[in-house]
Image: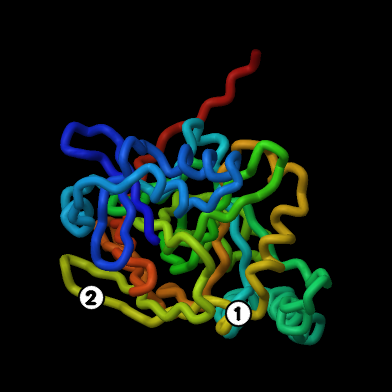
Amino acid sequence: MHLIQFQDETGARAVAATEGTTTSVVTGATSVYELATEAAERGLTLRAVVIEKGLGRSVDRAALAREGRLLVPVDHPDPAHLYVTGTGLTHLGSASTRDAMHKSNQQQAEAPLTDSMKMFRMGLEGGKPKAGEIGVQPEWFYKGNGYAVAAPGAPIPSPSFAKDAGEEPEIAGIYLIGKDGTPFRLGFALGNEFSDHVTERVNYLFLAHSKLRFCSFGPELRVGELPRNVSGMSRILRDGKVIWEKPFLSGEDNMSHTIANLEYHHFKYDLFRQPGDIHVHMFGTATLSFADGIKTEPGDVFEIEEAQFGLPLRNAVAWDKERPVVIHQL
């Protein structure tokens, strides 16, 4: 089952579910957050709650996308209570680009291996622990909250001070924290973990700055487990023409960590188990247009697609105008 959130003909919120080739409105539902909360409180699956609510008229997902009426597949009534985080160096091949980005900034004699390559090797050796064991922790970063999420089809704004505006095609895990602090996984969605790779390349310690950017995920929430093999396509269009495209891989068959290990090392912190919060966690990538020398321009369109996740995720690049920040003393 896939879930979407959208605006109906009157502008009101609605939820629809897809099974097979049919997409139908979930009766009486206005948010996936409410459906998931009910499922967690009643000890049911998200799919079971949707079926219990009932399915009504059919809708055309592609038409909703063309009309700009799609919303992110899950949000929070208070955007400050939606966390966007991620892990890096988790995919086979993900270290090569990062290593090349940072190696020129280190003395070969002093550091034959960059920190990125060391962490990647740690993942290869300990990222897939045996049952009952805890694996090595991955690289982790904070990206923002619900105020930094662009809806599918909406532009992703890049701040005026940014040096680069680049896509990162990823899979995002979507979670709700239950009343007793238990993390519940709703499912997975396509994600664009939009980043500033030029800033990151200046110095590895600027990674945290480079990640504080908008992002997008969806349009569909794939309820259930993540397929072991995810094989999609990431592309950039300029004036309607493809200027770059490349396949991307995800799923545990293509990763150096298990999903369970990455989840554990995020939710082991009490801070991330606060009742009612939503977490959108990006699991990393090995494919970047930046690595191929692409520099995006305002109006370029990112397109990330994978058949197992339904509709593609499309967002244009936008650049914010400079806005002075003035600090006032109280």
x and y percentages locating residue 228 in the rendered image: 53, 79
Residue drawn 49% across and 51% down?
46
Q: Quadrant of residue 99?
A: bottom right
Does label 1 or label 2 sit earlier along the sequence? 2
Q: Quadrant of residue 258?
A: bottom right
Q: Does residue 145 appear anywhere in the picture?
A: no
Quick check: 149 left or right of 5?
A: right
Question: Could you give the CA–CA distance between mark 1 and mark 2, rounded to whole angstroms?
Answer: 28 Å
x and y percentages locating residue 141 in the rendered image: 64, 56
Mark 2, residue position = 242
Q: Secondary structure at mark 1?
A: loop
Mark 1, residue position = 255
Q: Quadrant of residue 129?
A: bottom right
Amino acid type, label 2: Val
Q: How many marks?
A: 2
Marks 1/2 in contact by CB < 8 Å: the verdict is no
The answer to which of 154 and 27 lies nearer the viewer is 27
Q: Secondary structure at mark 2?
A: strand
Quick check: 158 left or right of 175?
A: left
Please state, as top left, top right, bottom left or bottom right, where the C terminus lies in the image.
Answer: top right
Residue drawn 34% across and 74% down?
307
Q: Nearer the viewer, mark 1 or mark 2?
A: 1
